[in-house]
Amino acid sequence: MTVPRDALGLGLRPDHYAALRKGAPVGFLEVLVENHVGRSELPRRRLDELAGRYPMVGHGVSLDVLGTDPLDHAHLRAVRALVARYAMPWMTDHLCFSRSEGLAHHDLLPCPNVAELVPYAAARIRAIQAAIGVPFGVENVSAYLAWARDDLPEWAFLRRVAEQADCGLLLDVNNIWVSAHNLGFDPYDYLDAVPWPRVLQVHVAGHRARPDGLLHDTHDQPVCDEVWALYAEAWRRGGPFPTVLEWDAEIPALDVALATLARAAEVRA
């Protein structure tokens, strides 16, 4: 099943399985691959129940794109099988590292934005894309501090990596807003540098403000007005593109999530 360029989708979460089985006006589902590539067939059987109703795309949190450990080819083979089973047109993960010295950190850890890292990142991405057999996109992550070694703004680093790897992008508008607030840059400067033809899809999500003033990318709040404004500008510059709403904690009922998707349609109109 294809994903229309203007499709509005949801990050698939167990809280919504029952309602989605009955049918809902959702353009597509983004599937967290790590939840569906284990030994148990139950998660895949649940996907089977939804696969005839909704197109699906793959999203990962553990490919360790910028890590120093060797790529996990057993995991990549499992991802490839999942992608093929549900005819996913693309797969995405984050431009960061998540492992070191064989240990998983269970977090998305940003690397320095330095020119010397670009060829290394591009080579890893090309290997991942070849292994999974479909177009692969990298996502910008939220940042809470800047590296002293940075010699490129994040958006320039992201663009150079995507161009050298010849890969796609998953542009997370909420992450741009969070990082801009935390690091003090203009989020609209970020949009200026985006190579829009490479954007496979866009994320919107919510965040929390911490007592110390930092914004924390929690995915447990409604999308704020500032992120909607940035999304509208992204759509003006680079749309159409498929859009996914992420909600990972304090997940609302499906009708609330659908109302948020309706807001996305209103904002970009």
Image: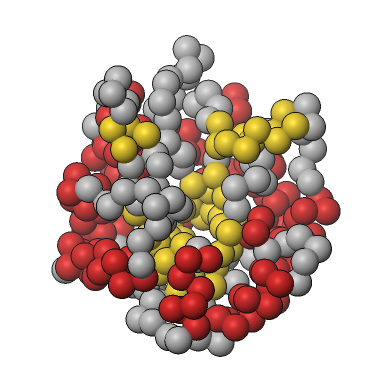
In this orientation, which residue lies closer to the viewer: 247 or 95?
247
User: Residue 103 in the image: x percent, y percent?
Assistant: 75, 32
User: Residue 249 in the image: x percent, y percent?
Assistant: 43, 50
Residue sitting at the far top: 148
- In this rendering, would 179 be left or right of 62? left
Task: Specify the quadrant of the image occupied by residue 238.
Answer: bottom left
- Does the rendering let one see residue 93? yes
Quarter of the C terminus within the rendering: bottom left
Task: Specify the quadrant of the image occupied by residue 132.
Answer: bottom right
- In this rendering, would 133 be left or right of 227? right
- In this rendering, would 159 be left or right of 252? right
Give above or below for 6 relative to 211.
below
- Report the residue at 19% width, 44% height from top: 226
- Report the residue at 53% width, 48% height from top: 138
Give above or below for 175 relative to 170.
above
- Does the rendering let one see residue 180? no
In this orientation, which residue lies closer to the viewer: 18 or 197?
18
- Report the residue at 24% width, 40% height from top: 188
In this orientation, which residue lies closer to the viewer: 156 or 128?
128
Task: Specify the quadrant of the image occupied by residue 26.
Answer: bottom left
User: Residue 196 in the image: x percent, y percent?
Assistant: 37, 55
